[in-house]
């Protein structure tokens, strides 16, 4: 398990997933590019499922690495993918009953920049045309076409929560949306966006106080994820509504929950969450929270693996 004793650069992460697919062709489909970043890097995806009921089983979406400095997100995704595969032989029920669609690292350009330039970079790396200050980057978790620009984001290009010039303007957001739509994920019943830090399990909405149509079930799911983590590692995560943390518009989870699935299939229930991984807010000061020691990759991965298994079963039982 040496791989999980440190963080890895983009090209090594790509190679790791490619190798995983080569070793487990029965379970993993490697998608080398769902689109390119501003700096022309490929955004990769994988599909993870067994051959049982391949065309009928429920689908779950996971993505991470929207925010460049949140390294534990992509690392955690790798950990639970690895664990699902390792445990499949002894416990096939999960990959037999669900298909996972995973984009492990969305903001490749920003991530590369955190390795070579500024460790605490958050946004993507697209220079903003015509900006007086020569600002670079849009916050990819404010750019989705879901009540874009309706609060909790900035229209100032130098801001770390800059929403971008228009909804869905960024190549990385466009790539995920295109991949989602072209691939026609009609069996989707869950979508999780993994961030750090603060140890939170957040449910829609993020932009309005209006309760989500499925609030009681979304709460049950979020609380269950929290409890599964607690049971696995003893770590306390807080389960709450995104708006109760703070307002944000144009976020990925609101897009999946509302703009996409609710509008498209109004009778569809979607378990959409944003999870903020380790550390907890009271363990650190500010930016230190994004620099989680690599010894924490495996413990974080283990608690989220348990949470993912619980979540998938819960969603399937409560469609
Ligand atoms: O602000 C964000 O995009 C997320 N936090 S982070 O520190 N990883 O940047 C949380 C978004 C949760 N949604 C709302 N609070 N509306
Ligand atoms: Zn984030």
Image (cartoon, rainbow, N blue to C red):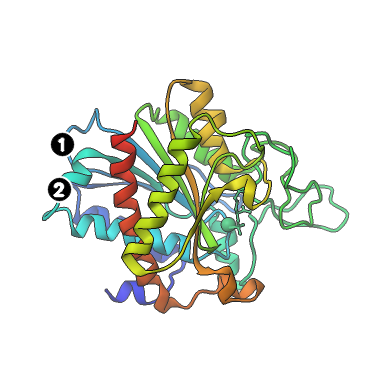
**What label does residue 92 carry, if any?**
2
Instruction: Work out whether 82 lies above or below 265.
Output: below
Relative to the observer, which residue lies in front, 93 or 219?
A: 219
* Observer able to see residue 314: yes
Q: How many marks?
A: 2
Q: Quadrant of the C terminus?
A: top left
Q: Up-down: is 313 above or below 88?
A: above
Q: Secondary structure at mark 1?
A: loop
In the rendered structure, are the residues bearing label 2 and label 1 in contact, judged by CB atoms less than 8 Å apart?
Answer: yes
Residue 88 in the figure: left or right of residue 212: left
The crowding category of the residue bearing disc 1, from other C-alpha atoms within 10 Å (few below 14, some 14 to 19, many at least 20), is some
**Label 2 secondary element:** loop
Residue under label 1, please give it: 52
Q: Residue at x 66, y 39 (%)?
A: 207
x, y percent for residue 25: 20, 48
Residue 150: which quarter of the image? top right
Residue 14 can be seen, yes or no: no
Residue found at x 79% / y 47%: 129
Q: Earlier in the sequence, mark 2 or mark 1?
A: 1
Residue 227 x, y percent position in the rendering = 38, 56
Dividing the picture into quadrants, the one containing residue 288 is bottom right
Eye-nearest disc, 2 or 1: 2
Within-10-Å neighbours for mark 2: few <14, some 14–19, many 20+: some
Q: Where's the N terminus, which quadrant?
A: bottom left
> Does mark 1 have its CB less than 8 Å from ligand 2?
no
Image check: 177 left or right of 186?
right
Percent coordinates x, y for residue 276 in the rendering: 52, 58
Alpha carbons under labels 2 and 1: distance apart: 10 Å
């Amino acid at each position: 398990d040496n791989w999980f004793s440190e963080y890895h650069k983009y090209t090594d992460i790509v190679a790791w997933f490619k190798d995983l697919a080569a070793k487990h062709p029965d379970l993993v489909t490697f998608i080398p590019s769902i689109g390119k970043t501003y700096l022309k890097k490929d955004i990769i995806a994988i599909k993870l499922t067994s051959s049982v009921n391949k065309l009928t089983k429920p689908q779950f979406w996971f993505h991470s690495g929207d925010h460049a400095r949140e390294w534990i997100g992509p690392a955690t995704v790798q950990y639970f993918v690895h664990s699902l595969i390792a445990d499949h032989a002894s416990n096939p029920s999960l990959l037999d009953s669900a298909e996972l669609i995973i984009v492990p690292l969305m903001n490749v350009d920003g991530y590369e920049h955190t390795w070579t330039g500024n460790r605490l970079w958050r946004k993507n790396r697209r220079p903003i045309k015509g900006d007086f200050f020569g600002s670079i980057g849009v916050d990819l978790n404010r750019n989705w076409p879901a009540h874009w620009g309706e609060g909790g984001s900035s229209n100032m290009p130098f801001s770390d929560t800059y929403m971008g010039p228009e909804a869905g303007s960024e190549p990385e957001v466009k790539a995920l949306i295109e991949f989602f739509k072209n691939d026609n994920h009609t069996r989707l019943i869950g979508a999780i966006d993994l961030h750090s830090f603060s140890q939170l399990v957040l449910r829609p909405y993020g932009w309005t106080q209006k309760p989500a149509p499925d609030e009681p079930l979304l709460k049950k799911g979020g609380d269950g994820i929290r409890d599964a983590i607690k049971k696995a590692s003893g770590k306390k995560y807080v389960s709450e509504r995104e708006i109760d943390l703070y307002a944000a518009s144009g976020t990925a989870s609101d897009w999946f929950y509302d703009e996409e699935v609710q509008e498209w299939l109004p009778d569809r229930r979607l378990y959409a969450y944003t999870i903020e991984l380790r550390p907890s807010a009271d363990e650190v000061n500010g930016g230190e929270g994004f620099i989680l020691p690599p010894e924490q990759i495996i413990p974080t991965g283990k608690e989220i693996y348990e949470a993912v298994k619980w979540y998938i079963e819960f969603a399937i039982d409560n469609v």
